[in-house]
Amino acid sequence: MGHLQDKSVYLGGAISNCPLLKQGINWRPPVIQELETRFGLNVFDPLSDPKQQFVDDVKRAQQNKDEHALRMVATGFVQKDLQKVARCDFTIHKIVTNVDSPGSTDEIMFASRQLKNPTLIVCEEGRFNLSTWYWGCINPEFLFSSWDELYDYLAEVDDPNFSCGMSRRWNMVREII
């Protein structure tokens, strides 16, 4: 392991609208396993966060049309996730085309545009199927069509001879400056 050892990464992706989760399939564990064992990363998974205990409160507030209760819980979710994004060295997000995931989009834009952190996106339908908005905001070298492509890229970043090239966003993570 190299420069990524003990760095922190936020693993984002649709939760409430994720079709796989609705089928009882969680894509995150094998990704977390690979990031931890291969690169020594500390992975924050918002799906495993204790705040998920309040999902039933959200559903109840929606059913009861209780906008005050819904706003209170939702505000807490947003604040906590964005605080975690801010504390991580970089983010990785899984984007599924045609799945509404405003939380992921907000986290991506916050990490990339405000924090200037490396913000990596995997779209298994193919990176060229990502919304044009992502292409306009995220460095194309951070857009991947598979997890294997992402892992290969991270292996390059982890290498002591890695050159940051066009993107200097890795300099802080790798403690070059």
Image (tube, rainbow, N blue to C red):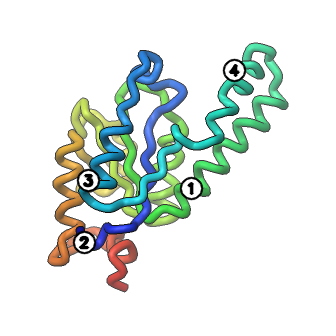
Graded by Cα atoms within 10 Å as few (under 14), some (14 to 19) or many (20 or more), the crowding at tag 1 reads some
The amino acid type, in three-letter code, at marker 2 is: Gly
SS of the residue under disc 1: helix
On-image quarter of the C terminus: bottom left
The image quadrant that residue 145 belongs to is top left
Whichever of callouts 3 and 4 sits on the residue coming sooner in the sequence is: 4
Disc 1 versus disc 2: distance between alpha carbons?
A: 23 Å
Q: Position of residue 128 (x, y in %)?
A: 23, 38
On-image quarter of the N terminus: bottom left
Q: Are marks 3 and 4 in contact (CB under 8 Å)?
A: no
Whichever of callouts 1 and 2 sits on the residue coming sooner in the sequence is: 2
Disc 2 versus disc 4: distance between alpha carbons?
A: 44 Å
Mark 1 lies on residue: 84
Mark 4 lies on residue: 59
SS of the residue under disc 3: helix
Left or right: 36 in relation to 111: left
Disc 3 versus disc 4: distance between alpha carbons?
A: 37 Å
Q: Which mark is residue 140?
A: 3
Q: Is residue 161 above or below residue 148?
A: below
